[in-house]
Amino acid sequence: MASDQSETGKSEGLRLRARLRYLYHGGQPQAVKFRLMVIVIDIAIIGFFLAAPILKEAGWAFYVLDYLIAAVLGLDLAARAYAYSDIRDWLKRPIVWVDLFVLATLLFPIWLANFGFLRMLRLWTLLNSDFFWRTVGRRFDDTRVEEITRALAALVTFVFVVTGFVYAAFRGRAEHIHGYLDALYFTVATLTTTGFGDITLPGNWGRVISIVVMLVGITLFIRLAQTLIRPHKVKFPCPVCGLQKHDPDAVHCKACGEILCIPDDGA
């Protein structure tokens, strides 16, 4: 009897894993619709993270919503882990650890309140995940859009992470930083090296943070500009040498000379 129950449990577990793999990795319309729904929920959660400094004034209602989002995010991560073929390999991915840390800030909002600004990293993990691009659609002529989106996501995420950090660390300590908008204004002014000087961070650490924001911000701006200016390439692995990107009208691989058959609208 116990053996039969054990076999039944294993069978149900395998069916559940197969179902989750179908939903999270399948290419059928039903699976794509499911992932689109997950992405929409993710975007709503990111919106909550963005508005969190203001919503905290709602008191207990904020924490109720915080724990509800933690439950949703926890279920999503658990489902992805169970659907993955090798959970150890899944745990080796940096994006997973970022999501786990975001989950920790949701589960322990009081103890990890000073790290709440890192929740905006969820935007970066979403727009850099295969889950997102596999769902939205990774066509041969969409690689440029993907690169621009990734670069823009890195820049926007950096802006809001720094804004959250400045708000959490310097509100009330730095002159003129009294609210989230003040922190955002300082971040954008510093990142763009505009430097009006009306809002500055105090002390040597304030100067160091400002320098880091400027250097990283300029780097991210340059990366975004490169993706906008760089000649368009299509992602089509060469069957011989494995070169991943080629000109849209390429007939031969530039590395090995192999004849390519890159699909296009006119093919």
Image (tube, helix red, strand yellow):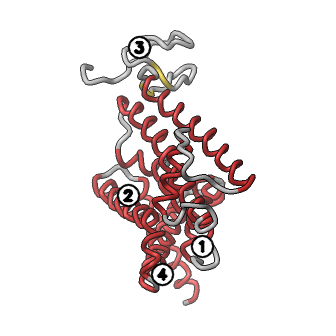
* Contact? badges 2 and 1 (CB < 8 Å): no
Instruction: Tell me which label, 2 or 1, sits earlier in the chain.
Output: 2
The residue tagged 4 is 63
Residue pictured at 48% horizontal, 79% vertical:
67
| Crowd tier of the residue under label 4, counting other residues whose Cα lies within 10 Å: few below 14, some 14–19, many 20 or above | some
Left or right: 233 in relation to 164: left
Instruction: Tell me which label, 1 or 3, sits earlier in the chain.
Output: 1
Q: Between tags 2 and 3, which lies in front?
A: 2
| Crowd tier of the residue under label 1, counting other residues whose Cα lies within 10 Å: few below 14, some 14–19, many 20 or above | few
Instruction: Tell me which label, 4 or 3, sits earlier in the chain.
Output: 4
The residue tagged 1 is 113
* Contact? badges 4 and 3 (CB < 8 Å): no
In this rendering, the answer to whether 181 lies above or below 12 is: above
State the image coordinates of residue 195 (x, y, percent, origin top left): 55, 42
Q: Between tags 1 and 3, which lies in front?
A: 1
Residue pictured at 58% horizontal, 58% vertical:
96
